[in-house]
Image: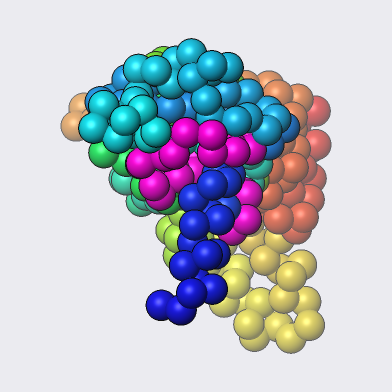
Amino acid sequence: MGIFDSIKGEAKRNFIARADEAKGEIVYKYPEKNVRMMTQLTVDADEVALFVKDGKVEGKLGPGRHSLDTSNIPFLGKLIEGFTGGNMFMAEIFFVSTREHTGVKFGGPIGDVRDPETGLGIGTMVYGDFSIRVTEPEKLVVGLVGMGRASNEEFLGWFKGQVLKVTRDRTAEMLVKKKWPLLDVTSGAYLEEMEVEILAGLKPHVDSYGLTIVRMGNFHVSIKPEDEATLKKLSKDVAYSRLAGGFQQYAQGQAMLGASEGMAKGGGGSDGALQGMGMGMGFGMAQQFANQQQQRPPQPAETAAPAGDTRSPAQRLKEIKELKDAGVLSDEEYTAKRAELMKLL
């Protein structure tokens, strides 16, 4: 090391501040513990400097330039090392940002969640970002020192793990208790309600560290594309079965629909129209079959037929409109079913 390097190193030891490359960090720990008296310490406008010894915060300095001397900063007297003749004190110095830090990303798997509409267990993921602010720097530093996580990277890694844990637990709990269809959740229909619940769940975990999660952003619950396709197919089957009055009637409607599709393949350009007609015929015949089963007296070897659909045509028209708006029914399917129901009015 040359003489100029030695002079430069000595100059650095006489001035303490947050390193330029650490300006965006929430917590920055000054690398030196032995500090000379009369050293100049600079604290930025949006941070505080904490002096820690043996896991205890002995003092705090706010924004500004400070000359580290016991005559104007009394708590430094607790940090002086006697063997230095009073010329040096020993402490860990933490610079803690007090502004709101945005765009902290997190994400991970929630696990298998049972979709209430289809009964399938589907693997789900959650991801997004959040903003964080330190409200009590002393609590944060003492907590981090106690856990041995003094660097900003270690702190954020631990904290994002806490956010993911609470988000995963609360999201799974809401899906189970509220019985939200998983397709509605992944579409973003309940994100605002979920965010409120997750922030409330995080509060007791972060309060003890003097932290506040201000808000969440770009928050999403997602599933694999192939699972989404499966859910859409099964959800459509469930909806059709409900409209047909039961699974048995739906199965017969599907059989008629299959027959119409075979006709359409041989009929050239009228494919879509025939499919729509086949669906209407299938559901119409299925409903007719259900009515006949209800009206026909039970035979000796049979049990009584299940009760028929008690919904009015107007109610069923409203239901199929909701299914169309939700994307479960296509335009052609909706038109065919609506025409069938209009005949009953």
Where is residue 71? Give x, y as percent: 54, 16
Where is residue 103? Give x, y as percent: 63, 46
Where is residue 83? Give x, y as percent: 23, 32
Is residue 254 positioned above or below 272 on the image?
above
Q: Name the image quarter holding the N terminus.
A: bottom left
Residue at 74 percent across and 42 percent down: it is 325
Residue 274 visible to the viewer? yes
Quarter-wise, where is residue 309 in the image? top right
Left or right for 345, reference 184: right
Q: Residue furthest front?
A: 85
Q: Name the image quarter holding the C terminus.
A: top right
Residue at 71 percent across and 60 percent down: it is 276
**Which residues fall within the magenta stretch?**
20-43
Is residue 271 positioned above or below 66 on the image?
below
Say which of 128 and 268 sits in front. 128
Where is residue 235? Give x, y as percent: 50, 46
